[in-house]
Amino acid sequence: MKTLLASLALAATLHSPAFAQAADTNRRVASIDELRACMNGNDATRQRHQALQERGEKLVQESKSVQADIDAVNEEANRMRLDSNISPMVRDRFERRQRAATARSEALQKTSAAFDADREALNKDVAELSAKCNGIAFRNEDLETVRKEREAAGKK
């Protein structure tokens, strides 16, 4: 989850005025297409970040639920160790619960691994977008044109 927070911080840089007009005349002036691509890329990574954040929150809740199941199974296992007269039906029920908890735990591990891979891919894409788009200069008329296009398309 610490890495999720790191990705949140990284994504926050997307919301900074990275697309502001450059005052430094040594900067390369981007074309209107490059400006459009950067702004669209920013939107896409922001949406991916939001979806990833929602998945992360669900993953945390599932993790708590799985841990509660595992704790309950472990508590029952401890009680069973103390009781030598356990009926086969009780033992079978316990073993089914134990298998179910193990299966949920393994599924959670796979889901977490997929989440981590998606987070790493997003971080890579954000870094590439930042390298490509941060520090570029552009003409004010290009910015106004792209803003009007985005407003017409319902984008911010």
Image (cartoon, helix red, strand yellow):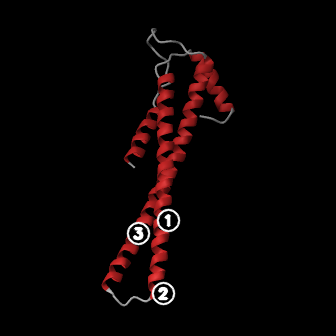
Q: Secondary structure at mark 1?
A: helix
**View extreme (right): residue:** 152
As shown in the figure, which amino acid type bears the numbered disc 2? Answer: Met
Between 87 and 57, the one lying in front of the other is 87
74 left or right, relative to 51: left
As shown in the figure, which amino acid type bears the numbered disc 1? Answer: Ala
Q: Earlier in the sequence, mark 2 or mark 3?
A: 3
The residue shown at (65%, 26%) is: 148
Between 129 and 76, the one lying in front of the other is 76
**Residue pointed to by mark 1:** 103
> Residues at badges 2 and 3 in contact (C-beta under 8 Å)?
no
Q: Secondary structure at mark 2?
A: helix
As shown in the figure, which amino acid type bears the numbered disc 3? Answer: Ile
Residue 89: numbered disc:
2
Q: Secondary structure at mark 3?
A: helix
Between 71 and 78, the one lying in front of the other is 78
**Residue pointed to by mark 3:** 70
Q: Label 3 neighbourhood size at 10 Å, few (<14), some (14-19), many (20+)?
A: some
95 left or right, relative to 40: left
The quarter of the picture where residue 64 lies is bottom left
Q: CA distance from mark 2 to mark 1?
A: 21 Å
